[in-house]
Image (cartoon, grey):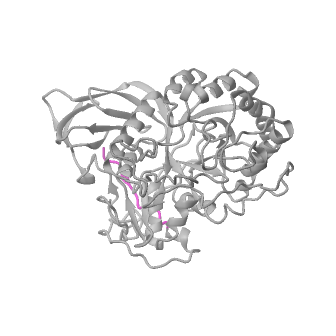
Amino acid sequence: MNRARGSTTAVLLAFLFMACGPSTSATEPEGPGGAGSGAGGPGSVASSSTSTGGSTGSGGTDASGSTGSGGAGGEPTGDGGAGGSSTGGGPPVVEPTLITSGPDEYWKTGTPTEVTSGNADVTVDDATTHQRWDGFGGTFNEVGWNVLSMLGEAERARALELLFDKHEGAAFVYGRIPIGASDYAMDRYTLAETPNDTAMASFSIDRDKERLIPYIKAALAVRPGLHLWASPWTPPTWMKSNGAFDGGRMKDDASTLQAYALYLAKFVEAYAGEGITIEAVHPQNEPNYETRYPSCIWTGPLMAKFIGTYLGPTFADRGLTAQIYLGTMSNNESGKDGAIISAVTGDATAMGYVKGFGLQWNMMSSASGLRSRNLPIVQTEHKCGNYPWNPAGSPPFDAQKAPNDHAYAEESWGLIRDWIKAGVTSYSAWNMVLDTAGKNLDSERPWPQNALLTVDTAAKTLNVTPVYHVFRHVSEYVDPGAMRVAATGGDALAFKNPDGSIVTILYNSGNAAKMTVLDVAGKKLQFSIPAHGWATVNWT
């Protein structure tokens, strides 16, 4: 497929308020001029893999157009805005029809060969459709912005472009925000720690203004229509049975539950005051995991009562447009989070306020049973790899540093593929950016977790990890509003975009490169997929 694009909007202006040191990154070749009059500027990212061309220059009229705002919650109705008109400058940049990645070379562009004979390895049937696709996203955490702030302006801008830009990056359209501390906060906190402050007089997002809000605003500068949703890892400690950030259970009295509903409402309102629209709130991250980092246990009846009697009415009374999702469900051991889903879906009052479902980790099997609800089912957190409960795994657990290796990229492809085939409408990465160690707040066993991008804090350089390319193979060319279509005969996903173009992503698990024939829209296209690698084909 050949889709012309204009020049990328310059994002450096979003960072001028920061005090930044000089960039120490490697310099890529200059990118081509865009549809405006500005010439392409130099790219600057030190990557552990082959990077795309440099960022386009900021001169001239931007031709990218604005991004549509979409609908609320997990099912946006908008898509990227139409490209604006421009004059002068170089020729429009043409998107490639074939991109391949393997352990020896990531993100290699090319062109498939059209053939007229031979059997197809993979066949796409765009007349057989599955679910509507709304897009990919990732999570904003304090540690991510802390390490991004150690980079020079150009590399920090490049990181945001790699994640959110439509034509020079992964084109993420969703962002998850923790309400208070996640396990990748700099330390433990909530937004209202004054004991028994049921009126929320002490509520404050001042802490978030240090890292989270600048991180989000930097992303919004690249992707103005970013869909943002939020979830807490823990309520304020005085609302819990153990009075601590880690573990414990949510109290079950009317005063506490009403105070917590107000807490979540004030979060939405406070962020709106910063110009940040929260489209959906999930009441609790992983409500059946009691961990040594911020967490809280909920039962099914308590969650149903909280949503139906407190949270839903509070949002309605305050005129909030943020939707309530039942999420983020994660632990299906002995059906624990499944019991919460059953309790809430069986409560008509609670379901009057629930507008979607958030599932992650071990809850994939629950997706099929929720389809009949005709509500969005969103995948809320990608598995992070390097599992400490599997020390003899392949690869084995590394207690000192996140591996960020190709093996994790291959694991991630299987997860993304299977969740999408299970029927989810969007998919969220976990940490978008971490330092190279990647350790979380676990008080006894800090867990080194993988990320899409890493920052070497000593060298002050940005690195692109293998798993980033796996996400981008699917996310960049599949537009919000696409329909997943049938792909048979191989390990593949296929989508039909609103403009009629068809995007197919294929994986080769073999130890040797594989010459492959793809039958799409009546055309047979031949190309090679690297060993343990991927190919994305864009075709009209």
- Where residue 114 sits, quadrant-wise, is top left
Towards the viewer: 4 or 515: 515
Tell me: 468 left or right of 208.
Answer: left
* Image coordinates for residue 481, horizontal then vertical, percent: 49, 37
* Image coordinates for residue 413, horizontal then vertical, percent: 36, 40
Tell me: 398 left or right of 432.
Answer: left
Towards the viewer: 261 or 71: 261
| The C terminus: image quadrant | top left
Towards the viewer: 79 or 253: 253
* Image coordinates for residue 526, horizontal then vertical, percent: 18, 38
Question: Is 2 covered by the magenta stretch?
Answer: yes
Name which residue lies at 55% across and 42% down. Answer: 78
Up/down of 421 relative to 223, above or below: above
Name which residue lies at 38% across and 62% down. Answer: 463
Up/down of 400 relative to 526, above or below: below
Q: Is residue 522 visible?
A: no
* Image coordinates for residue 296, horizontal then vertical, percent: 67, 42
* Count of labels in the image: 0
Name which residue lies at 79% across and 38% down. Answer: 316
Name which residue lies at 48% across and 49% down. Answer: 172
- Give the farthest residue toward the left: 117
Q: What is the span of residues highlighted in magenta in the rendered image?
A: 1-11
Question: Is 248 covered by the magenta stretch?
Answer: no
Q: Is residue 124 visible?
A: yes
| The N terminus: image quadrant | top left
- Most prominent secondary structure in the magenta stretch? loop
Up/down of 389 relative to 447, above or below: above
